Image (spheres, grey):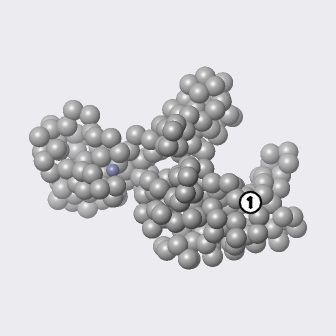
Amino acid sequence: MRLGIDLGGTKTEIMALAPDGTVALRRRIATPRDYASLLRGVTELVAGADSELGARGSVGMAIPGSESFGTKLIKNANTTWLIGKPLGRDLEQALGRPVRLANDANCFALSEASDGAAAGAGSVFGVIAGTGVGGGAVIDGKVLGGAHGIGGEWGHIPLPAPSIEEVKEAPLCYCGKRGCLEVWCSGPGLAADFQRVTGRTAGAEEIAASDGWSIFWIRT
Ligand SMILES: [Zn+2]
């Protein structure tokens, strides 16, 4: 049995895949808000899956950010309290088995390239826009991680062709720079920009559903 865990900004989900690829179990919890609670939460999810299925599964986890090749500490995570933490080592200790970590956007892109929306395509760029923005590149079925494991990430480059205001008043990003694409294009970024421009408060889904064109009009 293979256990896959998706650590998201708001929810964390475990799925068990049987040897034939069918989904044997799916459980979800709200993502804990600190590191110790996260370790506990994931340990409970895995223990629960093991006991429900009566088998000890192998564990892989999709995480925001990635593991540094050398130190194995987490970096580039928008769930910022993960940064600098030895997540893989701590989980292996807590679960008593090997744990494989991989960047969530890379997992998503690889999944879509394998048997999803991009099945059969040689070059795939998967884009995620949610609590943060991320992406993954898959070439000929292999993730293009690059020298630092962050290949395909587009969230921390500047807005293309920004206006003067968008440069001077660019919001601060958690990475320490100003005006990264993530502070404009993520759900919270879109909501904050909408609030700045219109003075109104709305979530990203509501904005996308009802006011897309008026935002465009106000900004131009
Ligand atoms: Zn940034």
Check mark 1 vs ligand 1: CB closer than 8 Å? yes or no.
no
Q: Quadrant of the N terminus?
A: bottom right
For image coordinates 60% across by 45% down, the residue present is 107
Q: Is residue 42 above or below residue 197?
A: below
Q: Is residue 118 above or below residue 7?
A: above
Query: In the rendered image, which quarter is residue 59 located in?
Result: bottom right
* Residue 10 position within the rendered picture, expressed as x and y whole percent measured from the top left: 49, 64
Question: Who is closer to the viewer here, 194 or 118?
Answer: 118
Query: In the rendered image, which quarter is residue 141 located in?
Result: top right
- Asked whether residue 24 is in view, the answer is no
Question: Who is closer to the viewer here, 121 or 75?
Answer: 75
Question: Circle 1 sits on which residue?
Answer: 98
Query: In the rendered image, which quarter is residue 162 located in?
Result: top left
Q: Is residue 102 above or below residue 14?
A: above
Q: Quadrant of the C terminus?
A: top left
Please give the count of numbered marks on the rendered protein: 1
Specify the amino acid type for callout 1.
Pro
* Residue 175 position within the rendered picture, expressed as x and y whole percent measured from the top left: 34, 55
Looking at this rendering, what residue extends furthest in the front direction? 70
